Image (cartoon, rainbow, N blue to C red):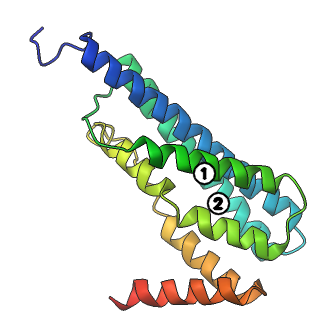
Amino acid sequence: MNTEEKTDTPSVAAGMSSLTAILDTHALMETQVGEIYINFAANFGHNPDLRSLWGTMALEEGGHAALIRAVNKGLLAGVFQAKSFLLPMEVVETLVVRVSDYHRQAQGPVSLDDALQITWELECSELDFMRELLVSSSNIADLGFPTNLESRDKHVSRLRELIQQYATDEGLRREVKFLSAERFSG
C-alpha cells in the first residue's frame, strides 16, 4: 500500500470523520424535508394538484436521503473515495436550524400560503447545492450509481405554477414570478 492510498493517518481519519458527520446531518435534513412535504400533502390532500406535488416531492427527498446515506456507507466501507472540499460549517449549521424550524412549523396547523412559502424556500435553499457538492466529492458517479434525480427542475417548475395558481400572498407570487423570469431570461 503506498502512502497515497493510506487512510488511517490522523488528518485523513479526522477529515473522513467530519465528512461522515456532515453526510449524516445532510441525510437527516433531507428526511425532515420529506416529512414536511408529507405533512403538507396530508393537510392539503383535498386538492389533488397540491397532494400530488408534495407527495412526489416527499418521495424525491427520500431518494436524496437514501443517496447521501449510500455515499456515507460507501465511504465508511471503502467502496467510495472522497476528494476534499471546502464546506463552511456555518452553511451546514444554518441549514440545520432552518430545516428544523420548518419541520416544527409543519407539525402544526399551517396555511396554504405558509406551506407554499416554506416549500419555495426549501427548494431555493442551499440544500440541493450541498447535496451535489457532497455527492460530487465522491467517486459514486464513476462507479455507475445515480447521483442526481433529474426531476428537480420539473418539480420546481410545477411548484411555481401552483404558487401562481393557489397562493394569495402577493409577495410570494411576485418573488416566484420575478425569479422565474430572471432564471429563464438569461
| Residue 176 place in picture, x, y as percent | 58, 83
Location of residue 135 in the rendering, given as x and y in whole percent from the top left corner = 37, 43
Is residue 88 found left or right of 84 in the rendered image? right
Q: Can residue 62 be seen in this view?
A: no
The image position of residue 157, as x and y in percent, is 55, 78
Residue at 28% across, 36% down: 139
Q: Which amino acid does label 2 sit on?
A: Met
Q: What residue type is labelled 1?
A: Glu
Residue at left offset 32%, top offset 88%: 186
Number of the label disc, if any, that sits on residue 61: 1
Asked if residue 38 shows in the view, the reply is yes
**Along the line of sight, the residue nearer the viewer: 18 or 58:** 18
- Residue at 79% across, 87% down: 168
Asked which quadrant contains residue 83, the reply is: top left
> Looking at the image, which residue sits at the far left?
2
Q: Kindly identify which numbered label has been placed on residue 38.
A: none
Left or right, residue 2 beside residue 9: left
Q: What element carries label 2?
A: helix
**Circles 2, 1 touching at the beta carbon (< 8 Å):** yes
Q: Is residue 11 left or right of residue 178?
A: left
Residue position marked by numbered label 2 in the rendering: 57
Q: Position of residue 2 (x, y in %)?
A: 9, 11
**Residue found 64% across the figure and 51% down from its top:** 99
Q: How far separated are the C-alphas under marks 2 and 1?
A: 6 Å
* Residue 1: quarter of image: top left
Q: How crowded is mark 1: few (under 14 residues within 10 Å), some or many (20 or more)?
A: many
